[in-house]
Image (cartoon, helix red, strand yellow):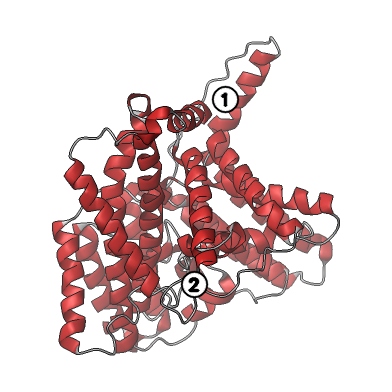
Amino acid sequence: MLFNSLDFAIFLPIVFCLYWLLKNQGLRIQNFLIVGASYIFYGTWDYRFLGLIIFSTLTDYVIGLGLEKYHNNKLKSKLLLFTSILVNLGILGFFKYYNFFLENINHIFYFLGQEINISSLNIVLPVGISFYTFQTLSYSIDVYQRKIKPTKDFIAFAAFVSFFPQLVAGPIERAVHLLPQFHQERKFNYNESADGLRQMLWGLFKKIVIADNCAVYANNIFNNSSDHSGSTLLLGAFFFTFQIYGDFSGYSDIAIGVARLFGFDLMQNFAFPYFSRDMAEFWRRWHISLSTWFRDYLYIPLGGSRGGIGMKIRNTFIIFLVSGFWHGANWTFIVWGAINAIYFLPLLLLRKNRYNIKIVAQGKHFPSYQEALSMAIKFSLTMFAWIFFRAENLGHALSYIQGIFHPSLLSIPDLPQRKNIVFLLLLIIYFVFIEWLGREKKYAIEKLFIKHNPILRWAYYYSIIYMIIVFAGQEQDFIYFQF
């Protein structure tokens, strides 16, 4: 069930009304409704994989109770934690990486002169498996580290794991933040709900108007890259850069907004990353829930930025390579991670990775010349790395880059319907302008026109709705569903 579908437009109001009508029946009933609604939401993709979510939920619920029971027994506690890690990563590894490893084993033996043909399996990747397995795994780790006490309320825990707004593409919530909210009484708050609707509206604009329109041209150019000029290939990379941001941050905005309708607070997942001035700042602002997950559960346990230069380099490459591999079973994602590690390392080694902490041009209308130049350079580096992320394989990525650095780079892009492309570029300029205006908030239109005349404010909201209806691109699945 897509957020931008008619099914969800029917599903959400029904669940919303039932949820608040059941308020006087107690938290457990409300939480039970969330679990049921979440399983229906997920089951519309493939009901068979509901068993995986239930199994993962049961496993970490029982392990959490066991960690509490044996908290004075280090051996049993470590064994329970290892079981959680093994089960969660084992499920993820089988469904997501089994065929990848199998194919590479075949290639290695072929290279060594021993041809083997181990048949791959026809495995369907369950939607959102990378998200909910990391969420349940973090619960067990936090219980083990005494950051949170395990819950004895299975319904509340099941609701935490399967909470439908963020189930299939995040944000990846921590138990210390989200789980206690299922144990607290929720009261309907009009202002919070209205703000949630605004955030949903902006998320839908990002997805339907920006991402889906960019996808049409990005897909056409990447899928037929050998037929296009260098300038067209550059334009394709530019469109994909905005497609993936509009798509994923749009999903996060909708998820956070929907959660607020039900009285829940989800963490901010994007903080205007394309306005970053260096790559360290970019990774503090892009997919925040995943980058902080890897920081807390992998990077810091490895030693983080402590130790000598060798350890810093090792840990940096590990964190980025694992992050790349998390995105998919393809060498393109691993190379994408390595490129970002190379971008990040000089800042870390020169101790400039915490240089740009404050919001760019905070309290000002325009950035300085140095800030504008830094943002342009960072954006160009990011766009280059996204080529590997989007390409079908490494050969495709390298040929695409080679095609860009061709004399035809100085030519006019060879695409039909140039008027439509110009119009899309104007939409992107408008989008960037609104994002710039709201860069100091949690989302772009959070406070836009709030202090102005209500007529002006509502006119603006209706203008966004109008653009969503009139300028909607061809419906596309959310990119991160495949991860």
**Disc with the residue nearer the chain's start (1 vs 2):** 1
Residue 244 drawn above or below residue 162:
above
| Residue 469 percent coordinates (x, y) | 15, 60
Side (left or right) of 449 relative to 307: left
Q: Residues within 10 Å of mark 2 (few under 14, many from 20)?
A: some
Residue at mark 2: 267
The image quadrant of residue 60 is: bottom right
| Residue 18 percent coordinates (x, y) | 26, 77
The image quadrant of residue 278 is: bottom right
Q: Residue at x 71, y 52 (%)?
A: 316
| Residue 431 percent coordinates (x, y) | 31, 63
- Using the image, tell me which numbered label, if any, was put on residue 103: 1
- Using the image, tell me which numbered label, if any, was put on residue 83: none
Residue 404 drawn above or below residue 21:
above
Side (left or right) of 346 relative to 11: right
Quarter of the image with the N terminus is bottom left
Mark 2 falls on what kind of element?
Answer: loop
Q: Residues within 10 Å of mark 1 (few under 14, many from 20)?
A: some
Mark 1 residue type: Glu
State the residue in front, 139 or 9. Answer: 9
Side (left or right) of 481 relative to 215: right
Asked if residue 135 shows in the view, the reply is no
State the residue in front, 374 or 389. Answer: 374
Mark 2 residue type: Met
Q: CA distance from mark 1 to mark 2?
A: 38 Å
